[in-house]
Amino acid sequence: MKVLIADKFEEKGVAQLKAAGCEVVHDPGLSGDALRAAIAELDPQVLVVRSTKVDEAALQASMQLSVVVRAGAGFNTIDVEAASGRAIMVANCPGKNSVAVAELTFGLILALDRRIVDNVVDLRRGLWRKKEYGKARGLKGRTLGVVGLGQIGRAVVKRARAFEMPVVAWSRSLTDAVANELGVVRCESPSEVARGCDVFSVHVAACDETRNIIDAKVLGKLRPGSYVINTSRADVLDYRALLCAMKELDLRVGLDVFPEEPKSGESDFRSPMAEAGALVYGTHHIGASTDQAQAAIADETVRIVKEYARTGRVAHCVNLCERSAARHVLVVRHRNRPGVLAHTLNAISFAGVNVDEMQNVICEGLESACARIKLNAPLPDEIIRKIESENEHVLAVTFASIDDE
């Protein structure tokens, strides 16, 4: 199987893929037209990327391309809708960078509270300002607000305990039981989190539902002097509203992500947020950039590719249909012989009914199997009888509605 890695990637991971029998092309400089040209020329079955954007044109460049793996947690740089239209599976590596991002989150919180950056800048300028920088609130007993409780958000909560910070949190899937298990107070909305915290930290994935989820309304609920941290994605926070809230509420802000940030590792970059003054501390989208995180992500990427090569299954696939439109199921118990499934599918096709999902499970001993076929419409009785009677290896056929599944 041919694998194109179009981004920076651990050499250990490249070696592991080659050892597994994959033909690997590693070209970390590919993007845009160059990426599309490479996909067209190499015709890979698997594409691995980190920050490289994969658009519809790139996905259309090869008929063989069947899996795109994002070597990281998010997948907003990949045109998932276009991939789904071509039956290309998109996978990511969730949770493998959670510790790294949580560590940076608390690094920014501590830096803001103790004004570490300004301390260093003045020392390098030859200034001693202990009187000024000796003023700090401290974190113990101050409330941390967390929006988003995926693996990164939970890693942040875990570290908050070490700082003796109570936590209030909101997540779309958070229940009272899970909140109790995590030791957090569940809020009904991001606004309620903002209202009840001293430090407000965002950890939601970027998607249509979360775009600007932290807007002027949410930011306006913050207490004066609060800290705002964003180590997730720039799309989830309205940065114009944040600039206004900073002035009105005297906020301190720690950011690892910025709107329209450079795609390359080295570039000129100007941002209103980065130039907003001493109350904003910024890093260069380095949340996942530790050796530990990158090694874990590489290992998970290798596992995904190897499992796909061995079984055809794609771990952590983000564009599988959660529930098909099928409302009927045909169950065919049969001897494990050639032609049984072809006979069954031909009859279904003759009836003009579409197969939405199908699973054929082989029983122990390899002599028999059971096919479970989900259909988008009911089968006429004569078709069911045809399936059951016109192949000697069909043992039994049942047909039922699955409206209540």
Image (cartoon, rainbow, N blue to C red):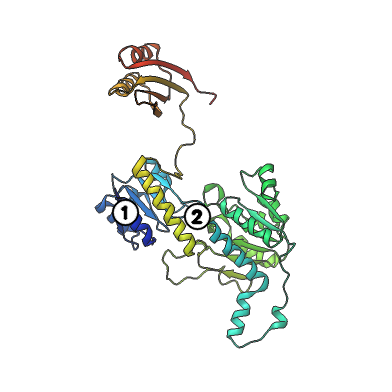
Q: Is residue 136 left or right of residue 376?
A: right
Q: Quadrant of residue 277?
A: bottom right
User: Would you name the residue on which mark 1 appears?
Assistant: 19
Q: Is residue 148 left or right of residue 198?
A: left
The residue closer to the viewer here, 151 or 264, is 151
Q: Which mark is residue 96?
A: 2
Q: Residue at x 30, y 20 (%)?
A: 343
| Looking at the image, residue 328 lies above or below residue 127 | above
Q: Residue at x 30, y 59 (%)?
A: 34
Please say if the residues under marks 2 and 1 sit with CB atoms less than 8 Å apart: no
**Crowdedness near tag 1: few (<14), some (14–19) or many (≥20) residues, C-alpha within 10 Å:** few
The residue closer to the viewer here, 208 or 134, is 134
The residue closer to the viewer here, 187 or 22, is 22
- Secondary structure type for disc 1: helix
Q: Quadrant of residue 141?
A: bottom right
Please state the horizontal and vertical placement of residue 64, each as a whole percent of the image.
29, 45
> What amino acid type is highlighted by mark number 2?
Lys
